[in-house]
């Protein structure tokens, strides 16, 4: 995940970098107001939450956009998809310094 987020392999950043996976049932996710369980097979919903510390870098909108695009491209590649699904969402949150 460091490569898509930072744009390059950064060994020094690995110690402080965490990835958490939480799987939810198809009855806990909705796409367009329809439960994924009711949408049938192929309903592909994913939420990726990128959270960074304010002091870690420059998080202007264009930098956030690049991170989100890289994360989605990496997930599509990992899933063997030609492109990210429109049902994949990425949130980008910045935690204020001192929080």
Image: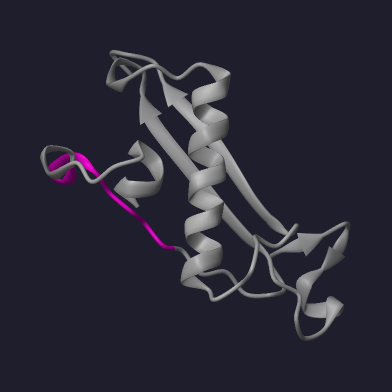
User: 45 or 85, which lies in front?
Assistant: 85
Residue 52 image offset from top left, x and y in percent: 37, 30
Left or right: 35 with respect to 21?
right
Q: Residue at x 18, y 38 (%)?
A: 13
Q: Which stretch did the figure color magenta?
A: 14-21
Where 51 falls versus 25 (above or below)?
A: above
Q: Is residue 20 magenta?
A: yes
**Which colour scheme appears in the figure?**
one colour
Residue 97 image offset from top left, x and y in percent: 32, 13
Main secondary structure along the magenta-highlighted residues: loop
User: 97 or 80, which lies in front?
Assistant: 80
Q: Residue at x 27, y 49 (%)?
A: 18
User: 45 or 61, which lies in front?
Assistant: 61
So how many labels did they put on this image?
0
Where 99 falls versus 42 (above or below)?
A: above
Q: Residue at x 46, y 40 (%)?
A: 50
Residue 83 image offset from top left, x and y in percent: 65, 62
The answer to which quarter of the image holds residue 21 is bottom left
Q: Which residue is farthest bottom? A: 41
Q: Which image quarter is the C terminus in? A: top left
Residue 70 image offset from top left, x and y in percent: 49, 46
Q: Residue at x 75, y 81 (%)?
A: 42
């Amino acid at each position: 995940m460091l490569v898509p987020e930072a744009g390059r392999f950064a060994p020094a950043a690995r110690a402080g970098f965490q990835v958490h996976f939480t799987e939810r049932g198809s009855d806990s996710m909705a796409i367009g107001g329809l439960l994924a369980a009711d949408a049938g097979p192929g309903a592909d919903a994913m939420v990726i939450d990128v959270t960074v510390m304010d002091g870690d870098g420059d998080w202007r909108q264009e930098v956030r956009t690049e991170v989100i695009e890289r994360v989605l491209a990496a997930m599509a590649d990992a899933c063997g998809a030609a492109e990210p699904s429109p049902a994949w969402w990425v949130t980008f949150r910045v935690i204020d310094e001192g929080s």
